[in-house]
Image (spheres, grey):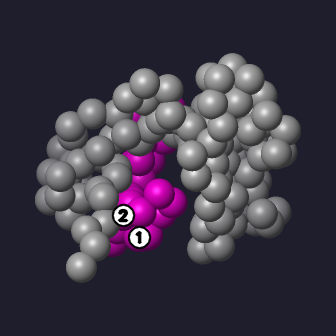
């Protein structure tokens, strides 16, 4: 893992939360995106070299909807940038971590993503992110 790629925050209302974070950071989101396969709408903010992703559920069965129902708004995950997501999945499985999706899937912000089960990471959902190379 190279660095923290972003911190994901689950929110009840993306529009309201975008206004809040725009005031907080002094800049609007640089990207808005919907990921239908995950049942989520996202926005991304930059603060220096750091990124924050806000996530709003688009359907009641999505992972974000379930998280919000159980825990309320707040930090949902920490994402780490990796050079080769497939190799990193193998390495982490060999270290004993439970990978929730062993085949990387397309996530927001032009990334391939995979997640580690929070039961093995002190209760924190960990996301692995690899930039999708444009051909």
Which residue lies under the disc numbered 1? Answer: 105
Q: What stretch of residues is rendered in magenta? A: 98-127
Q: Is residue 90 visible?
A: no
At label 1, counting other C-alpha atoms closer than 10 Å, the crowd grade (few under 14, some 14-19, many 20 or more) is some
Up-down relation of residue 132 to residue 23 (above or below): below
What is the residue that sits farthest to the bottom in this orientation? 135
Up-down relation of residue 128 to residue 78 (above or below): below
Question: Which residue is located at x 85 percent, y 38 percent?
Answer: 16
Q: Is residue 112 magenta?
A: yes
Q: Earlier in the sequence, mark 1 or mark 2?
A: 1
Task: Give the image location of residue 31, x and y in percent.
Answer: 58, 52
Which residue lies under the disc numbered 2? Answer: 112
Task: Give the image location of residue 78, x and y in percent.
Answer: 45, 36
Q: Secondary structure at mark 2?
A: strand
Q: CA distance from mark 1 to mark 2?
A: 5 Å
Up-down relation of residue 7 to residue 111 (above or below): above
Quadrant (top left/top right/bottom left/bottom right) for the C terminus = bottom left
Task: Give the image location of residue 132, x and y in percent.
Answer: 31, 66
Of 115 and 56, nearer the camera is 56
Question: Which residue is located at x 65 percent, y 73 percent?
Answer: 36
At label 2, counting other C-alpha atoms closer than 10 Å, the crowd grade (few under 14, some 14-19, many 20 or more) is many
Task: Give the image location of residue 1, x and y in percent.
Answer: 21, 40
Q: Secondary structure at mark 1?
A: strand
Question: Which residue is located at x 36 percent, y 64 percent?
Answer: 112
Mark 1 near mark 2, Cβ–Cβ under 8 Å? yes
The image's mark for residue 9 is none
């Amino acid at each position: 893992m190279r660095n923290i790629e972003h911190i994901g925050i689950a929110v009840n209302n993306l529009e309201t939360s975008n206004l809040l974070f725009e005031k907080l950071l002094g800049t609007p989101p640089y990207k808005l995106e919907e990921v239908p396969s995950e049942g989520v709408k996202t926005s991304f903010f930059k603060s220096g070299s750091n990124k924050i992703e806000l996530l709003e559920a688009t359907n009641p069965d999505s992972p974000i909807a379930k998280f919000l129902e159980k825990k309320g708004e707040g930090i949902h995950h920490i994402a780490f940038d990796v050079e080769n997501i497939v190799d990193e999945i193998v390495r982490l499985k060999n270290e004993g971590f439970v990978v929730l999706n062993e085949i990387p899937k397309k996530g927001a912000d032009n990334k391939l993503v995979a997640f580690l089960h929070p039961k093995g990471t002190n209760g924190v959902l960990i996301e692995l992110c690899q930039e999708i190379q444009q051909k």
